[in-house]
Image: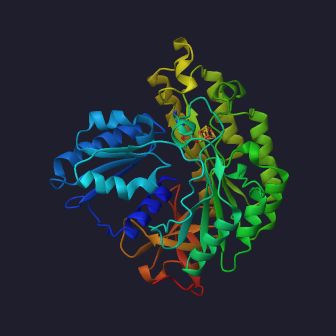
Amino acid sequence: MNVSDSELMLGTLAAHGYVSVDHPDGADVIIVNTCAIRDHAEQRVIGRLGELRRNMKPGAVVGVTGCMAQRLGPQLLDKAKHVSLVIGPDGYRALPALIEGARRGERGIHTTFDLEEQYEDFQPRRFDRVKAWIPVQRGCDYKCTYCIVPTTRGPERSRKLADVVRETRDVVAGGMSEVVLLGQTVNSYHDGEHDFADLLRAIGGVDGLRRLRFTSPHPNDFTERVVDAMASVDAVCEHVHLPMQSGSSRILKRMLRRYTREGYLDCVARLRAAIPALSLTTDVIVGFPGETDEDFDETLSVVREVEFADAFTFKFSPRDGTPATRMPPELTVSDEIASERLARLVETVRGMSRARNLGLLGTRTEVLVEREAKRGDAMLMTRTRDFKTVLVPGTEAMLGEYLTVELTGTTGSTFTGQIVRERQPLPMAG
Ligand code: 5AD
Ligand code: SF4
């Protein structure tokens, strides 16, 4: 969501005559787009702002945008004297005017929610050339007790289906063949007339679109209609990122996740019944207040039962103002115990994916070339429909192509592959 917001901001700045540069040194305007989900994310922003203060060109305008800006507001202006504008997720329209003000020496802040704001008239400047991030919903109406997002992004609202379809057509016309629909609980999408099932069918009907993904869904919003649409729309990929958070019903209740262990497993079973080749990944929090060894064992047992292909694992991070911070102090899980649980969880997930991935060596699969690999000469980062990463030899000219590859090696989590057959490249944007 933050990448997508940055693309919107870059878009409006380009429309106002700004040109982006690769490095903050020498820039006239520096915008730090922030996340507030865990303390670690905010500490990194504070570190980055300190670095900028030391290295930036004298007189440069520094702005902080996004969830941390929304959360801290005026405190940021007080604490960081070199920051001259602070803008929350609904205020990006004010960005050019606030930058102009800042260049005249004013300091500005915009942290009001605007439930009508969907940035429909913005032309996002996309980082990615192969797949497009398309926000379909902003904000969140769930109130999970650990989570800062409802505070920083405000209530849930959806874009009109027709607007999302138009944007999809535009990106496909520009040469992209994959879109990722974004929302905090993306499958609760409802524009007043159409639900997420309608949206999947409408987007899936766009000519030239080959891969359709979405993130992140909430288990409770996988209605029969949505699951049916996923199974029947060819472009919908065989991968769902399904945040679980905990495998213990007791902890899930304290988290106000609104499902039990059995409810989560039932959702997994329904998805797998509809889409047999489905691969699942998840998010898990360890060390939530009151989590006992037994609760954590229940988390490990669901992880084993579901056989997630991968998991993002986090230590609980108390966020000011969230209900979890008001739980009795004796429920606090020590950092030592949380770290030990995190390590065991990571080991469990890794061990299982390593075993499964070794079993896939020698098989053939379709991949889309997403970008050049970060390390290694002339290697490309490609993905399977079910979200596995495969490194294959090739050059930048192959970006956006679909290839058939044979999986030849694995590090445990990612694969290396050999091209078996090259397919027709899709037309790429210039
Ligand atoms: N502490 C730790 N992890 C959190 N997440 C959200 N809030 C917190 C928190 N306070 C995790 C959840 C969510 C992911 C995006 O971040 O697992 O799914
Ligand atoms: Fe946060 Fe829960 Fe909303 Fe996800 S569903 S953004 S975890 S409040």
Relative to 9, 309 lies left or right: right
The location of residue 119, given as percent across then percent down, is 53, 60
Relative to 333, 373 lies left or right: left
Relative to 22, 72 lies left or right: right
The location of residue 224, given as percent across then percent down, is 84, 52
Relative to 223, 162 lies left or right: left
The location of residue 89, given as percent across then percent down, is 48, 48
Give the residue displayed 74% in from the left and 34% down from the top: 261
User: Quarter for ligand 2?
Assistant: top right
The location of residue 281, given as percent across then percent down, is 63, 50
Q: Residue 426, relative to residue 362: is it above or below?
A: below
Query: Colour scheme used in the picture?
Result: rainbow
Q: Can residue 404 be seen in this view?
A: no
Residue 84 vs residue 53, the one in the foreground: 84
Give the residue displayed 57% in from the left and 57% down from the top: 118
Quadrant of the rendered structure where residue 300 is? top right
